[in-house]
Amino acid sequence: MAEKIIFKEESFRIIGACFEVYKDKGNGFLEAVYQECLTLEFAGQKIPFIEKPRLRLDYKGHELKQTYEPDFLCFDEIVVEIKAVKCLTDEHRAQVINYLKATGKHLGILVNFGHYPKAEHERFINCADAHIEKTAITAGPKN
């Protein structure tokens, strides 16, 4: 039986927008440049998003003063975290996993614009049984 890909259409649109930014900019820029480009690309492709949303955290029913701020929240359900590094590390992955655990969102996408010769991304799914699965590592088109 084939596995169902959650938020399939939405995530394909997000990844496509990321590849479009990479196709234009390539690698070598700071993360803030890719953040601004992706903001413009999401808007141009009519992908609903919030840039740097403050996600509420709680502890035993008490709201914490601390918040998480992923780079984007798309379609009100998908956490998108971007990086501009040579290669992704476990710390980057842990950041996305923590966003998912803390917020209860079900899909996180980690995108690295610093990888050469292609952008890369990883999908993380927050499963109902309280574990996180990494579902894919892929690269996009070359410049």
Image (spheres, rainbow, N blue to C red):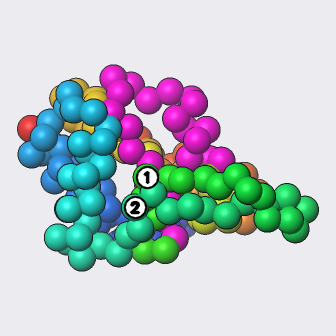
Q: Which mark is residue 108?
A: none
> Which is more N-terminal, label 2 or label 1?
2
Callout 2 secondary element: strand
Question: How many numbered discs sit on the rendered protein?
Answer: 2
The quarter holding residue 30 reads top left
Picture coordinates of residue 113, whole percent (x, y) = 28, 37
The x and y percentages for residue 57 are 72, 60
The three-letter code of the residue at mark 1 reads: Asp
Q: Looking at the rendered structure, which numbered label has been put on residue 51?
A: 2
Question: In the image, which disc is placed on residue 71?
Answer: 1
Left or right, 73 with respect to 42, comes to right
Q: Is residue 76 above or below residue 131?
A: below
Q: Quadrant of the N terminus?
A: bottom right
Q: What stretch of residues is rendered in magenta?
A: 77-98
User: What secondary structure is found at the residue carrying circle 1?
Assistant: loop
Q: Is residue 27 above or below residue 71?
A: above
- Classify residue 115 by image quadrant: top left
Tell me which amino acid carries mark 2.
Glu
Whether residue 51 can be seen here:
yes
* Residue in the image at 32% along x and 38% along y: 31
